[in-house]
Image (spheres, helix red, strand yellow):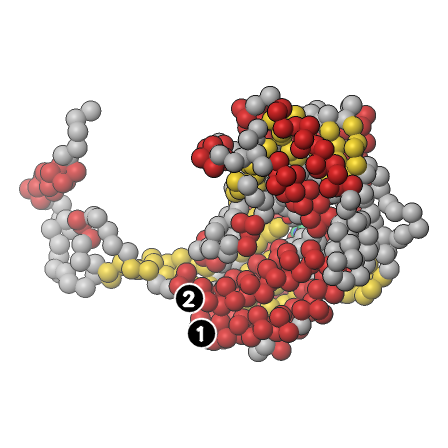
Amino acid sequence: MTTEEQAIESSVDSTVPNAGATQIAVENPATGEVIAHVPVFSPDEVAEMARRGRAVQPAWAALGFEGRSRVLSRMQKWMTDNAERIIGVVVSETGKAYEDAQLADWAYGVAAAGFWAKNAEPYLADEKISTASPFVQGRKLVLRHSPLGLVGVIGPWNYPITNSFGDCIPALAAGNAVILKPSEVTPLTSLLLLEGLHECGMPEGVLQVATGYGDTGAALIDHVDMIMFTGSTATGKRVMSKAAETLTPVSMELGGKDPMLVLADADVDRAANLAVMYSMFNGGQTCISVERVYVEEPVYDEFVAKVTAKAAGLRNGVSTGPGTADVGAMTLPKQVDVVERHVEDARAKGAKVVVGGHRGHAGRGGYWFEPTVLVDVDHTMACMTEETFGPTLPIMKVADAEEAIRLANDSPYGLSASVVSKDLAKGEAVARRLEAGTVLVNDVLVNYLALELPMGGAKASGMGTRHGKGGIRKFCQHQSILVTRFALSNEPHMYPYKKRVTQGMQKAIRLIYGRGKRA
Ligand code: NDP
C-alpha cells in the first residue's frame, strides 16, 4: 500500500458496527439524546424493494417530462411551505447550526427540485447529430437518453438533503425509480422528504428509502442499474469493487483535502473571512471546503492575526434557532476521534494551537470539537495530508505561489481548491495549475449553487459529476439511432468486393483526407 493509500484508508474505520441489529436508534449529536428509531432493511428486503421499484418505474417514465416535472415543482413548493419542519429535522439529526441546515441543505433542495423540474427535458431531449463523414451523409443521426430503470443512491451524513436526497431528484426527473440508502446516522430527513413527495403526487414505490447500515448499502448495489455514492474514498473503493461484479456503473463524490492559497496581493480581510467561514461551516464537515491554507510570506502574519480573532469569537454550541450558534456539533461520533488525532499529531510534531484544540464541552452531552486554528504546520502532519472533516484550520507559511501550488497538489485528493488574489488573471492562472475538479478564485463552495456548472472530483476525490447536463445524463442509457432514408438496394461497397470499386474508394478517401500539410 502506498503512503497515499494508507492516508485514505486510515481516515476510515472499516468495521461494520451493529451487525445483526434490526433497528437504528437515531441520536441528536448535539445532545446525545435518542430522537427516533428506524428499521434496518435486510438484503432480502432490499431485493423486494428493488422488485417494487422496477414494477412502478415504467408508469413513472410514461408520465413524461411534463408529468414528472409537475410532481417536482409541487415538491419545491412543499419544501418552501415546510421550511421550519425540514430544517428542524436536519438540525436534530446532524447537530449542525440552523443556518447551515437552512443554507446548504434546505435552500439547495428547494432550488434543485425546481432546477431539475425545468431542465430535465432540455438536457435529455433527443439530440440531432450532424456529421462530417461523407459516407453517412443524408442519414438521420439521433442521440437519445432514456432512463436506466432503477438507480441506487448511497448518501453520507453531513448533508442529508444535498448529498442524499439531492441526487435522487435528477435521477427521478430522468424517469428512473430510485432507492435511497441514507447514512445510518441521518435517516430522518430522507423519510420526511419521501413523505413530501408522496403528498406531491409521486406514486408509491418510485422513491423508496432503505434505512440501514453499510450492509444495506452493499445489498443495494446488487439490484440497481447504477449507483450514485457520496462518502469516504475508502468506502467508495469497496462500493466500486462490488459494483464491478455486476458491471453496474457508478458515479462517486469522495473525500477531499481542499487547499486555499492566499497570494501576497490578496484582500487579507476577505481571505481570512473565507478561510474561517468555510473551514468551520457545517462544523467543518463539508466535502468542498477549506481543509488547509497556504499563505505567502508577506501577508502571513496579518492573515493569521485576522483568522485568530475571527475564529476565537465563534459561538460553538447547540443551535436552537436562527442566530443562536455559529458552529454546531460533530455529526458522526467517531469523527471526533479523527479530529482529535489530527490535532494531537500536529501538536506532537511542533504545531501551535492558536484557537481551540479540544474535544467536548463542559456539562454538555453530544459530540463536540472546538473550532481550532493551527499554525507552524507542515506535510509531515496528518492535519495537512488526511481528510480531517472537522472544525480545524491549519495554516502554513510559504515562500511564494510556486511553493503553494506544489504543496496544494501534493495530495491524493482533488475535490476543490481556492485561490485568493486581487490580480484576477494571476488568480485564474494559478487555478488552472491546481489538480482539483473545481477551483474558485476569491471564493469557496458557492460553485455548488450554480446547478448549471458541473461539479466533480479529480484524483481520489471521485468520478462523474453532479449538476449540468452530465449530472442527469449519468442516470440515463444513451442510445444512438441512425436512420437511412434514401438508399440503393445494393451500395457499391457491399459484397462482392470488387477491385475497381476498392481502388476508387481509396482514391476518394485520399482526395478527401489527404490534403493536409506534408509531415
Ligand atoms: P462512509 O463512506 O463510510 O459512508 C457513506 C455511506 O456509505 C453511508 O450511507 C454508509 O452507511 C454507506 N456504506 C458504508 N459501507 C458500505 C458498503 N460496504 N457498501 C455500501 N455502502 C456502504 O462514510 P462515513 O460516514 O463512515 O464517514 C467516513 C469519512 O468519510 C469521514 O470521516 C469523511 O472523511 C468522509 N466523508 C466524506 C464525505 C463527502 O461528502 N465527500 C461525506 C461523508 C464522509 P452507514 O452510514 O450506515 O455506515
The label number, if any, that marks residue 66 in the structure image: 1
Give the vertical position of 416 relative to 77 (above or below).
above
SS for tag 2?
A: helix
- Identified by mark 1, the residue type is Glu
The quarter holding residue 404 reads top right
Residue 29 at least partly seen: no
Give the vertical position of 357 relative to 80 (above or below).
above
The label number, if any, that marks residue 121 in the structure image: 2
Residue drawn at x 75%, y 51% as measured from the top left: 326
Cβ at disc 2 under 8 Å from ligand 1: no
Residue drawn at x 37%, y 61% as measured from the top left: 144
Residue 175: horizontal and vertical position, in percent?
49, 67
Residue 74: horizontal and vertical position, in percent?
56, 75
Q: CA distance from mark 1 to mark 2?
A: 8 Å
Nearest the eye: 189 or 441: 441
SS for tag 1?
A: helix
Q: Quadrant of the N terminus?
A: top right
Residue 295: horizontal and vertical position, in percent?
62, 29
Residue drawn at x 61%, y 45% as measured from the top left: 288
The quarter holding residue 310 reads top right
Callout 1–callout 2 Cβ contact below 8 Å = yes
Give the vertical position of 351 relative to 196 (above or below).
above
**Mark 1, other Cα within 10 Å: few <14 / some 14–19 / many ≥20:** some
Q: Quadrant of the C terminus?
A: top left
